[in-house]
Image (cartoon, rainbow, N blue to C red):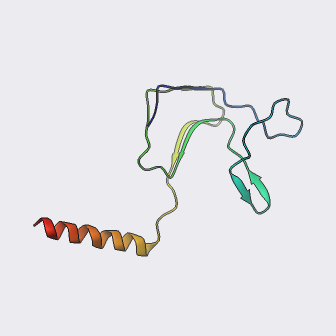
Amino acid sequence: MIERNDVFWNNYNYFLSGSAFHTVSEGLGELSGQTVNYPTGVGIVLYGSDTTSSAANHVFGNYKWGIASFSGPAKPHRQRRQRSEERQQRNRRKT
């Protein structure tokens, strides 16, 4: 739960060469030899977080998004089928 925060003006791009300020982050990782950095200009980003919520936050002045929520990659078919079968077995035991 992300709640009761003031999230504002996250627009400064620390990652530009010649930036007067530097981030303490090493980024999110690497993709094709390039460092993938945290996005600038956003307040709160929830990626693939089905059970995380945001409430009672003051979010303003962010250039791109205030709050964004994206679904994560789908689970492979085999895992979905296995969970479905497990649910069916539990329901049978209850009856």
| Residue at the bottom extreme, as displayed | 78
Q: Is the residue 16 above or below the residue 74 in the image? A: above
Is residue 90 shown left or right of residue 26?
left
At 48% from the left edge and 27% from the top edge, which residue is drawn? Answer: 57
Quarter of the N terminus within the rendering: top left
Give the number of marks. 0
1 vs 32, nearest the viewer: 1
Measuring from the top left, give residue 60's x and y in whole percent. 58, 25
Residue in the picture at 36% in, 73% down? 81
At x 52%, y 26%, the residue is: 5
Up-down: is 39 above or below 11?
A: below
Q: Position of residue 33 (x, y in %)?
A: 80, 61
Of the pair 11 and 64, the residue shown nearer to us? 11
How far from the left and from the top, in percent, is residue 10?
67, 30
Specify the quadrant that holds the C terminus. bottom left
Rendering coords of residue 68 (x, y %): 54, 41
- The residue depicted at 70 percent of the width and 54 percent of the height is 29
Q: Residue extending furthest left?
A: 95
The part of the image, by quadrant, that contains residue 16 is: top right
Compared to 11, does 31 lie above or below?
A: below
> Taking 77 as reference, is 18 left or right?
right
